[in-house]
Image (tube, helix red, strand yellow):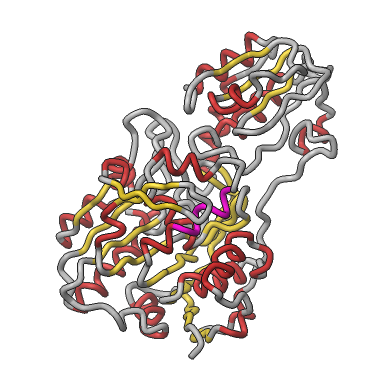
């Protein structure tokens, strides 16, 4: 028999999700006495600058709908688990739970809230010998519901069910996934081999294009994709935003290892017609041909300072600095050439000749360029990740007349850009 995926239009709660689960027989293997774990996508929290939630976080309303369905099925032991990235020390998963209404939901329905960052972990070994540590709660519960958001991603093109399970890893393992060898998209699909989600629900009420944390553009799409087959769910969800299976490296890796098909004709899609719900989204920003910065540098005529494009080795902790640096460099541009500075991040970029100073953001890139003879004067911004103020200081002391309020103003604008816009309902996240 073909693996089954359902595609339904979201119109009301909890009926739309009920239809999606029913069509794919999502509770076929669920016993009412099973310990259930829901793993949403709750990437991070920021107490200083509001993150517009649309397409960034799994909608709280849809998770609550799932809890209602589970309760109706007779389940009583239900937990929600996540390991949110700490962008600021001490601001982590529990802040995200509180900010998105999970504490209220836990009291109302008797749920357990689990912070994977504080879990005990079990070590797994990948085929190449690399070891990762997965939260034991993700391995020990009988029924895991994987609940990603429909979004594109600057390193893996899409971020769906397979990638959502990366949040079950401890922090050091997530960083290891970003090593240049064997690569991000080789590593994180292995989590599904061990956590083994029983059901994957992709929340497409909103979709996020070219986004992460504060950034990107969200659109109302109003679909739900569900399947007991994680690859099938991801294939259908990816197609709704215009990506064919061979476009996605981690789909290929997972399918090869499990001898699964990447042909959508080998999956049964129930509910809505897939062809009626395809909207192509972009996953990356434009960059200059000589890799000296985003295409907006070229548009404004900015020269002198270079910010090469991030790669897959840039992990979540340092990733906000990519946008931050671009905006701050632009703020320093006054119509004439900026100082000859190159700014690097991630784990493997190599400094190029011709620059007076090379700013290295984070311990990993400092180590990668320790013996690089192209560097005339290194400016090391230490930390894993370093504090934002260290980056600002390094830019300024290297001769860039930056305006840090330009960045903070941009964050403020991003957090408020959907306010009072039709279709963007904050009640879905409370």
Q: Nearer the viewer, residue 331 or 166?
A: 166
**Left or right: residue 85 compared with residue 401:** left
Main SS of residues in magenta? helix
Measured as percent of width and height from the top left, residue 72 is found at 20, 77
Q: Which residues lie in the magenta part?
A: 183-190
At x 22% / y 57%, what residue is drawn?
A: 105
Toward which corner of the image does residue 396 lie, by quadrant? top right
At x 25% / y 61%, what residue is drawn?
A: 140
**Left or right: residue 301 compared with residue 61:** right
In the image, residue 317 above or below residue 144: above
Toward which corner of the image does residue 245 lie, by quadrant? bottom right
At x 71% / y 28%, what residue is drawn?
A: 350
Measured as percent of width and height from the top left, residue 77 is found at 17, 65
At x 66% / y 67%, what residue is drawn?
A: 242
**Left or right: residue 329 compared with residue 4:** right
Measured as percent of width and height from the top left, residue 228 is found at 41, 76
Measured as percent of width and height from the top left, residue 283 is found at 65, 53
Q: Nearer the viewer, residue 367 or 429?
A: 367
Q: Nearer the viewer, residue 223 or 155?
A: 155
In the image, residue 97 above or below residue 375: below
> Quick check: is 399 in the magenta stretch?
no
Q: Nearer the viewer, residue 292 or 249?
A: 249
In the image, residue 414 above or below residue 65: above
């Amino acid at each position: 028999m073909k693996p089954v995926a359902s595609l339904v239009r979201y119109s009301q709660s909890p009926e739309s999700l009920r239809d999606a689960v029913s069509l794919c027989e999502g509770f076929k293997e669920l016993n009412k006495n099973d310990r259930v774990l829901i793993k949403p996508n709750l990437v991070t929290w920021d107490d200083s600058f509001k993150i517009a939630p649309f397409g960034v976080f799994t909608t709280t309303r849809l998770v609550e709908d799932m809890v209602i369905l589970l309760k109706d099925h007779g389940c009583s032991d239900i937990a929600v688990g996540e390991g949110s990235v700490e962008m600021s020390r001490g601001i982590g998963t529990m802040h995200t739970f509180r900010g998105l209404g999970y504490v209220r939901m836990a009291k109302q329905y008797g749920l357990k809230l689990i912070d994977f960052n504080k879990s005990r972990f079990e070590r797994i070994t990948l085929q190449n010998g690399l070891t990762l540590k997965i939260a034991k709660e993700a391995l020990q519960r009988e029924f895991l519901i994987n609940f990603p958001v429909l979004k594109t991603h600057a390193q893996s093109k899409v971020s769906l069910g397979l990638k959502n399970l990366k949040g079950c890893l401890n922090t050091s393992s997530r960083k290891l996934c970003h090593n240049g060898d064997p690569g991000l998209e080789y590593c994180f699909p292995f989590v599904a081999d061990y956590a083994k989600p029983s059901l994957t629900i992709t929340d497409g009420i909103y979709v996020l294009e070219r986004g992460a944390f504060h950034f990107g553009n969200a659109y109302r799409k109003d679909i739900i994709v569900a399947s007991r087959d994680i690859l099938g769910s991801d294939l259908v969800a990816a197609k709704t935003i215009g990506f064919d299976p061979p476009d996605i490296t981690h789909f290929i890796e997972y399918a090869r290892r499990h001898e699964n098909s990447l042909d959508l004709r080998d999956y049964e899609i129930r509910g809505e017609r897939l062809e009626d719900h395809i909207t192509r989204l972009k996953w990356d920003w434009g960059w200059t041909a000589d890799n000296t910065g985003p295409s907006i540098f070229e548009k404004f005529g900015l020269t002198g300072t270079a910010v090469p494009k991030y790669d897959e080795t840039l992990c979540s902790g340092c990733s906000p600095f990519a946008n931050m640096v671009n905006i701050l460099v632009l703020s320093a541009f006054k119509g004439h050439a900026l100082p000859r500075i190159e700014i690097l991040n991630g784990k493997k970029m190599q400094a190029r000749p011709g620059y007076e100073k090379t700013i290295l953001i984070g311990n990993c890139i400092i180590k990668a360029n320790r013996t690089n003879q192209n560097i005339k004067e290194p400016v090391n911004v230490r930390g894993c990740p370093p504090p934002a103020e260290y980056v600002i200081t390094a830019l300024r002391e290297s001769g860039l007349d930056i305006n840090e309020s330009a960045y903070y103003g941009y964050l403020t604008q991003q957090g408020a850009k959907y306010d009072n816009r039709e279709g963007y309902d904050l009640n879905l996240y409370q």
